[in-house]
Image (spheres, grey):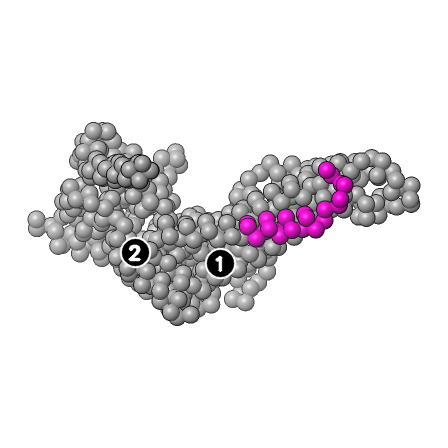
C-alpha cells in the first residue's frame, strides 16, 4: 500500500518536473505573452548600469537591453543584480536575460548559456593612489587590496599575486574603503575604473597596471533557451556591425576599446 | 588524508557534487580560516556581551538618575537598530570621524579594522538584550532576599555579586541561551564589512565554482553544529548550577 503510494507520488512529482521544464522551455514566448522583457542589469557600475540623479537605472547596457525589448516589441523591466546573485536570478526565472557586465567564463557557462559573440569586453586592473607607485601585478604581494564579492579575478589576485583581498558586497563600499585607506588598491574591471577616473574625487588615483585577461562579456540566458539565444546572437552581431557599441561608448564618454573596434571590423561587412 | 581529499574529487567527477573545500588546497585553507574566524568572532562577542549584560544590569539598578538614563539610551540605541546597519555605520560612517594612523606603506589608515568593528557592534547589540535579560532575572529575586543580604552587612555591589547575580543567573539562563544562539548566527552579517568569516569565504568559493547548493548545505550543517555545541554547553552549565528547590 505504502509502496504504491510512494511510486505514484514519485511518478507524479517526476511528471510535474517534466511538465515544468517543457513549459519553461521557451522564454521568448513567455516574454511575448507577458508583453515585458525582464532584464537583470547592474545598478552600481557606471557607465554600464547605474542610477541617475532621479534614481532610475541608466547606462550603456540598459540602452542595449532596451534595444532588445524594442526589437521584440515589448516593454522592459529592469532588475538590479550583483555578481554574487545574478546567475541564481536567471536560474530561478526571476529575470529572462542578464546583461550585467558578466564575463563569459567556462565555469559560468556550465550554469547559464552565453550569447556569442560577447557584446563587450573588459580586463582586470586596479585603481590605486598615485603615491603607492604600483607598476606590476607582483607589487601587490602582501598588500591589502579591496575587491567585490563574486568577481572571478579575486581568486587570481590572491593566489597568483599574493594580495590580501578585502571583498565587499558592492562597488560603492569598495570605493569608500579605498578612499578611507582601508586598502591600497581596488581590483576591478578596467572599463568601470576608467569611468570612475574621470571624476574629480579620484584625481590622485591612477590605473597603473597592465590590463590582464581581456575577456568578452556575454549576455546570458537560462540553460537550454536556444531560440532566445539564437535571436540574441543576431542582435549582438548587428550591434557590432552597425557600430552601435562604438556609438554608445562615445555617448558615455569611454574611449573606444580595442575589442569593440575589432568586432566592428569583423562584422561590418555583413 | 590525501585519500580522503581525493575521494571528494572523485565524488565531483562521478556525481557532480562539487566540494572544493576538501580537494583544493587553496579553498580548504580559506574555508578553514573562515571557520576559525567565525568561532573567534563568536567567542569574543559572546563573552563581551555577557560582561556588558552583567555590568549594564547592575548600573540599571543604580541610585543615580543619569547612570540609569545612560544605560537606557544605550539599550534603546543598540536594540532598536539592525546590526547590519550598525556595522555599516561604524565601519564606514563613524570610523571616518575617528583619528587615523600611518600604516607601514605610508598611508593613513583608520585605527579600527573590520574585525574590531564587527566585535564592537555584535557585542553591544547582544549586550543590550543581555542587560534586559539579566534585569528580568534580578527582578525575579525576591525583595526579602535582598533585604536579608543587606541586613547581613553586604554593600550594594557585594549583595549583587554574591547573592543576587548567582540567583538571577539561574532564572535568566534560558533567555540568555536564546540570545547567545542568535548572536552566533548574527556573526554572518560581518561579511558585509569584509570580515573573512564563514559566509564570506563560502561566497568567494561559490562565486568561483558556481556550487551554491553544495556550499549552502555545508554552511547550514556547520551552523547547526556550532550552535549545537553552544546549546549543549549552556545546558550543561544550567544543570550544573541548578539549586534544588530554587525556581521550581
Q: Is residue B30 above or below residue B1?
A: above
State how far apart marks 1 and 2 are (Cα).
Answer: 24 Å
Is residue B83 found left or right of A266 in the rendered image? right
Q: Quadrant of the N terminus of chain A?
A: top left
- Is A257 on the left or on the right of A135, as rendered? left
Asked if residue B132 lies left or right of residue A163, the reply is: right
Q: Is residue A228 above or below residue A207?
A: above
Q: Please give the name of the residue rendered at 19% of the width and 31% of the height, measured from the top-left corner.
A: A32
Q: Identify the disc placed on residue B34.
A: 1
Query: The magenta stretch spans which residues?
Result: B227-248
| Neighbour tally class for label 1: few under 14, some 14-19, many 20 plus, Cα within 10 Å | many
Q: Kindly identify which residue carries mark 2.
A: B16
Q: Secondary structure at mark 2?
A: loop
* Residue B33 in view here: yes
Q: Position of residue B167 (x, y in %)?
A: 76, 43
The structure residue drawn at horizontal position 84% and vertical position 39%, both measured from the top left corner, is B146
Question: Does the magenta run of residues contain B236?
Answer: yes
The extreme left residue here reads: A270
Structural crowding at the residue carrying mark 2, measured as other residues with C-alpha within 10 Å and reported as few (<14), some (14–19) or many (≥20):
few
Q: Chain of mark 1?
A: B
In the image, is residue A137 above or below residue A15?
Answer: below
Spot the residue most to the front: A1
Amino acid at each position: 500500500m505504502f509502496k504504491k503510494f510512494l511510486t505514484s507520488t514519485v511518478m507524479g512529482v517526476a511528471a510535474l518536473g517534466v511538465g515544468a521544464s517543457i513549459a519553461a522551455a521557451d522564454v521568448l514566448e513567455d516574454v511575448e505573452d507577458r508583453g515585458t522583457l525582464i532584464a537583470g542589469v547592474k545598478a552600481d557600475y557606471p557607465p554600464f548600469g547605474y542610477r541617475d540623479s532621479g534614481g532610475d537605472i541608466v547606462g550603456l547596457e540598459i540602452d542595449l537591453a532596451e534595444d532588445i525589448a524594442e526589437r521584440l516589441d515589448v516593454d522592459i523591466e529592469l532588475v538590479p543584480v550583483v555578481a554574487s546573485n545574478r546567475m541564481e536570478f536567471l536560474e530561478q526565472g526571476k529575470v529572462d536575460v542578464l546583461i550585467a557586465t558578466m564575463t563569459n567564463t567556462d565555469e559560468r557557462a556550465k550554469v547559464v548559456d552565453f550569447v556569442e559573440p560577447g557584446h563587450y569586453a573588459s580586463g582586470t586592473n586596479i585603481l590605486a593612489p598615485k603615491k603607492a607607485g604600483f607598476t606590476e601585478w607582483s607589487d601587490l604581494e602582501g598588500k591589502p587590496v579591496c575587491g567585490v564579492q563574486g568577481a572571478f579575478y579575486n581568486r587570481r589576485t590572491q593566489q597568483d599575486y599574493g594580495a590580501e583581498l578585502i571583498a565587499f558586497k558592492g562597488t560603492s563600499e569598495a570605493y569608500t574603503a579605498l578612499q578611507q585607506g582601508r586598502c591600497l588598491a581596488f581590483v576591478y574591471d578596467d572599463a568601470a575604473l576608467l569611468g570612475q577616473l574621470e571624476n574629480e574625487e579620484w584625481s590622485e588615483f591612477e590605473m597603473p597596471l597592465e590590463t590582464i585577461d581581456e575577456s568578452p562579456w556575454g549576455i546570458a540566458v537560462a540553460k537550454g533557451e536556444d531560440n532566445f539565444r539564437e535571436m540574441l546572437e543576431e542582435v549582438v552581431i548587428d550591434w557590432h556591425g552597425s557600430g552601435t557599441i562604438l556609438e554608445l561608448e562615445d555617448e558615455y564618454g569611454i574611449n573606444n576599446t580595442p575589442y569593440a573596434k575589432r568586432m566592428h571590423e569583423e562584422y561590418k561587412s555583413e | 588524508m590525501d585519500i580522503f581529499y581525493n575521494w571528494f574529487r572523485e565524488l565531483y567527477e562521478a556525481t557532480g557534487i562539487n566540494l572544493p573545500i576538501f580537494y583544493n588546497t587553496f579553498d580548504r585553507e580559506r574555508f578553514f580560516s573562515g571557520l576559525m574566524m567565525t568561532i573567534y568572532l563568536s567567542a569574543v562577542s559572546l563573552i563581551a556581551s555577557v560582561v556588558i549584560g552583567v555590568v549594564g544590569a547592575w548600573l540599571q539598578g543604580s541610585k543615580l538618575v543619569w547612570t540609569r538614563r545612560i544605560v537606557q539610551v544605550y539599550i534603546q540605541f543598540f536594540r532598536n537598530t539592525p546590526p547590519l546597519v550598525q556595522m555599516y555605520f561604524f565601519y564606514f560612517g563613524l570610523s571616518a570621524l575617528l583619528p587615523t594612523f600611518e600604516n607601514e606603506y605610508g598611508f593613513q589608515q583608520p585605527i579600527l579594522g573590520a574585525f574590531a568593528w564587527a566585535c564592537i557592534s555584535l557585542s553591544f547589540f547582544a549586550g543590550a538584550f543581555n542587560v534586559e535579560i539579566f534585569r528580568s532575572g534580578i527582578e525575579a529575586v525576591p525583595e526579602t532576599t535582598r533585604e536579608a543580604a543587606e541586613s547581613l552587612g553586604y554593600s550594594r555591589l557585594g549583595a549583587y555579586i554574591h547573592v543576587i547575580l548567582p540567583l538571577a543567573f539561574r532564572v535568566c539562563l534560558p533567555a540568555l541561551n536564546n540570545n547567545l544562539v542568535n548572536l552566533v548566527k548574527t556573526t554572518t552579517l560581518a561579511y558585509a564589512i569584509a570580515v573573512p568569516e564563514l559566509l564570506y569565504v563560502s561566497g568567494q568559493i561559490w562565486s568561483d565554482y558556481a556550487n551554491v547548493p553544495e556550499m549552502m548545505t555545508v554552511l547550514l550543517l556547520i551552523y547547526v553544529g556550532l550552535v549545537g555545541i553552544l546549546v549543549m554547553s549552556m545546558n550543561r552549565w544550567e544543570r550544573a548550577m541548578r539549586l534544588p528547590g530554587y525556581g521550581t
